Amino acid sequence: MADVRRVLEARLRTAFDVVSPGADPVLRPSDHADFQANGALPLARALGREPREVAADVVAAADLDDVCASVEISGPGFVNLTLADSYVAAELAAVARDVRLGVAPVAEPRRTVVDYSAPNVAKEMHVGHLRGTIIGDALCRVLGFLGDEVVRENHLGDWGTPFGMLIEHLVDVGESEAVEELSVGDLDGFYRDARAAFDASEDLRERSRRRVVALQSGDVETLRLWRVLVAESVRYFDDVYRKLGVLLGPDDVAGESAYNEMLPSVVSDLEAAGLLVESDGARCVFPPGFENREGDPLPLIVQKSDGGFGYAATDLASIRDRVDRVGAARLLYVVGAPQSQHLAMCFAVAHLAGWLPEGVEAVHVAFGSVLGPDHKMLRSRAGRSVKLSSLLDEAVERAEATVAASGRDPAGSRAAVARAVGIGAVKYADLSTERSRDYVFDWDRMLAFDGRTAPYLQYAHARIRSVLRRPEAVAAGAGDAPVAPSVREPAERALALELLGFEAAVRAVADELAPSVLASYLYDLATAFTAFYETCPIAKAPEQATRESRLLLARLAADVLALGLDLLGIEAPDSM
RNA sequence: GCCCCCGUAGCUCAGCCGGACAGAGCAGCUGCCUUCUAAGCAGUUGGUCGCAGGUUCGAAUCCUGCCGGGGGCACCA
């Protein structure tokens, strides 16, 4: 209801229908008014009429008296719409009464599985996992807030041939030694040592091969050792997730191994459907439209020539499981862009096999890579991938240094503020870049208090809370009183309109699976607030009515900032 | 060779279901703190929207070709 744009859109649609049924009003924000409807121009061409005449007919047919102060035809046939202050104020008052701040839940909630993060057991989480984890988490929060039933699934890499090697290494170093190493989070050290030993010893290679067989055939002791590796890794991942402040936890783990028992039926059902083709000893499906280097049909290898299952089999099983058992209406795969062909093939095969029925949507939510200052994949000085855990620690350390340098003494723990700022900076930098693009990781830029950064937004929020804590504000109810806000001053009006755009921003994130829309919106809101803050005294406004109105605007700005940041998984301290 | 993504101001990016002079942040330059957190605000400099065609009354946006960057292309996941 708070979305004034949708109200305008609906009214205009009715008016356009009168002129030509089904015509799109093409409503956009405008530099010349609050909004402009461009629909008369294309419609005029279709009708072979003068654009301004068509616009005039639309305006005549439109019922906008209660919402618009002025409706004017301009230029070649634009319809410029300026909202009535009374309408803006009334809508704002409605938002103020709404715990959801004007964001209505979706009419038809969908059960949505979000597959994201997916680190590998006994391997370090690195920056490659950063984007997927942050983006997936933000989408879960937004979809959940809009009322969808979100099922998080962390598709852990917990199965496959490397586990023969890893388990043998576990045995060699001794179980308690290994657990010790893993529990302090040195997964990379463990993996590297295993790898080095594997490469150096034919005996170990042979044992590893036998161990894989034992694992796959369900040998009890082997499974026990495997569970040790998984459990220690999951515990470590959970530490990282808590450090990062994401929703993901041990209960969300749906590792590859969880699909093991379904793999044979994936193969046999594909075979029964006549989709399976044997090629060079491997059992494959050749979905139409995919070619390899030589221009030959490209297979999705479901079962390898050695009888083992490929990851395609697991991915297909997960699709079936999520549709049949979980009952999902939508499957989101928050997975890096390089996997797009693989996922497209999996979806294609699932369609062919009838595993993705009508009404179930599968989407690859692809994201780009994290690049270093040299615009190449971000790596450490040593050329290794950057350990995610260390990166997060560095973010907090750097934030701590800036907070300390400011000489401020935020109420509450300085360490907590540093954590919110450091982690928030990393998340906002990531989320504010359009997700399909690669993005350049730059400490100084993301941690700056100037510009489009989390620290700027957090600071804007903290300033508002500070104003709301002032005695004059507390006395006036700090914006909680049911007042009719005034939007007479340009800065008041601009802030009010920005606040009314919150619902549209949140919905756009869900519709386009693009958290960056909300990230941009929050920056615009923060700048609208600071402009208002500069020109309009809030707690110190001389008149009681003005004070109450501005306190309401300020409180709403803080609430929307806090909620919006929360939907992105970013904390908003009350003081900093 | 084929497919996918990207190429917009010095740097980082928005806009891309066609519309009124191409926007923002940073950096640069100018101003503004005895007054609610100046970690702020206001103003300003800066662009052949990779190139060339095409469609259109109108193209950063749609189509085609080319150039440049990244990624993927059968038994690792």
Image (spheres, coloured by chain):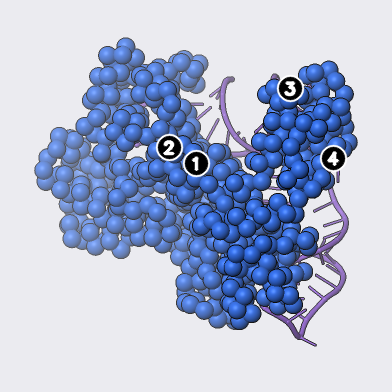
What chain is tagged by disc 1?
A: A
**Count of marks placed on residues:** 4
Percent across and percent down for residue A179 are 22, 59
B23 over A367 or under it: above or below:
below
User: Cβ–Cβ below 8 Å for labels 3 and 4?
Assistant: no
Which quadrant is the C terminus of chain A positioned in? bottom right
Q: Nearer the viewer, residue A534 or A43?
A: A43
A297 over B47 or under it: above or below:
above
Looking at this rendering, what residue extends furthest in the left direction? A220
Q: Which residue is mark 1?
A: A106
Q: Are marks 2 and 4 on the same chain?
A: yes
Q: Determine the CA span between mark 2 and mark 4.
A: 41 Å
Q: Determine the CA span between mark 2 and mark 1.
A: 9 Å
Provide the secondary structure element on which disc 1 rests.
loop
Q: Which residue is mark 4?
A: A72
Q: Which residue is mark 2?
A: A110
Residue at 24% from the left image edge and 34% from the top image edge: A260
> Pointer 4: residues within 10 angstroms few (<14), some, or many (20+)?
some
Of tags 3 and 1, which is closer to the observer? 3
Mark identifier at residue A20? 3
* Chain B image colour: purple
**Which comes before the other along the chain, label 3 or label 1?**
3
Of tags 2 and 3, which is closer to the observer? 3
Chain that is coloured blue in the picture: A
User: Cβ–Cβ below 8 Å for labels 2 and 1?
Assistant: yes
What chain is tagged by disc 3?
A: A
